[in-house]
Image (tube, rainbow, N blue to C red):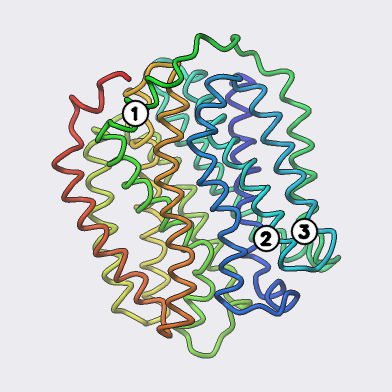
Amino acid sequence: MSLEIAFTLLAGLNLGIIIMNLPPVLTELMDLYASSYTQISVLLSALLWSHAAMQLPAGIIVDRLGVRATQVLSLACMCAGNLVPAVTPSLAWAVTGRAITGVGTGLAWLANLKLAAVSAPGGRAGAYQAFFAGFFSLGSILAYLVLPMIIKAGWQWAFVAPALLCLSLLILVPGLQLAPRGPVRPSGSLRRIVGLRSAWVLGSYHALSYGSMLSLGNWVPSLLAEASGHLSANHLVWGGAAVMLVSGLSRLCGGFIILRLSPFTVAHGSVLVLCILFTALAFIPTPGVVLGLALLTAWFGSINFGALFHLASRAASPESLGTLLGFINVIGNVGAVAFTLMFGWSKDTLGAFAWGFAALAALGVAVLVLGIRILAPAPVQRKV
């Protein structure tokens, strides 16, 4: 295994810990900041807002500056963003720090997706991108397992520990063997990508899949607490770890599946199953069933990652690949932000998470109908 591939896997672990370092200690943070569900959802989504906003700029940046320089910039942002909330127990400082961290994760996500694509053996870009995403989910599990123990030494360690991990990865960046950045096609390629209908469909599929998986990772302990009626989210934090474990395994499996099945079959089929699962979660409140449905949602919301980005990688030339991947991630992360906020709002305002799942089911059906009509081999394979 090359250093470049090994780095993408380690970067995936790091991103999983950083993006999901708050849900495992959510109860402690709500007490620390004296916040409501709606307020804490702002903190949870602060990283996602800037992460989503950075996706298209990050794609352009990685195409222009190159992967190595983008890695340095991203790790510096993630380190600084995690140190800001550790200064004082203030919700405002925490939100600010998470927003800075999101700039770094946005850059890192695109840099590592492109690194996996250009470093993978021929024809296997999607598989290695899926492995990177799988390690992201495994990193999220580490966050659930380790951070509740680390925070006993002080609430600051929920932020300081991820900052130290970023510093350790910086040591490996100079060893990455990458060709200098090639010629840039800034304006024309961007206009073409925005006008590519299949890119919008892939982004919408990614929003329903990644967005719902990340929302479950954030809210499943509270969702299980709501269903049980007597346990607190703090007692059910293992539910979030289970969701991220299933997600990681699913993404890893998805990398092998697209070597056997058509990526179009995987993409359409997974979204269809998600629509069914969202509907079931909206109407079935039994704790055991909710957990099973949540795990199935994490599985089918993750198994298509390699398929979606394999299709994307075939649709762009190397000079504009980062921009296309960024555009798809913009749409996907807007979904993650919107869904995280929607679940917090529906719990506070309507009294239950079920309304959020009902909205996702309706949205999923609409996107699937459009996707079946628009997403076809010919348009997706067209180079931009």
Residue annotated with mark 3: 85
Q: Residue at x 18, y 24 (%)?
A: 378
Residue 346: horizontal and vertical position, in percent?
A: 42, 77
Question: Are there few (<14), some (14-19), or many (20+) residues within 10 Å of tag 2?
Answer: many
Q: Which quarter of the figure has residue 240?
A: bottom right
Label 3 – label 2 distance at C-alpha: 8 Å
Amino acid tagged 1: Ile
Amino acid tagged 3: Pro
358 is higher (above) or lower (below) than 73: below
Labels 1 & 3 near each other (Cβ < 8 A):
no
Residue 108: horizontal and vertical position, in percent?
A: 60, 35
- Mark 3 or mark 2: name the one nearer the start of the chain: 3
Considering every residue shown, the one lying at the far bottom of the view is: 230
Instruction: Report the quarter where the N terminus lies.
Output: top right
Label 1 – label 3 distance at C-alpha: 37 Å
Q: In the image, which disc is placed on residue 33? A: none
Amino acid tagged 2: Val
Q: Secondary structure beneath disc 3?
A: loop
Label 2 – label 1 distance at C-alpha: 32 Å
Considering every residue shown, the one lying at the far left of the view is: 373
Residue 146: horizontal and vertical position, in percent?
A: 71, 58
Residue annotated with mark 2: 95
Instruction: Report the quarter where the C terminus lies.
Output: top left
Q: Residue at x 82, y 61 (%)?
A: 156
Q: Residue at x 66, y 29 (%)?
A: 71
Residue 268: horizontal and vertical position, in percent?
A: 22, 45
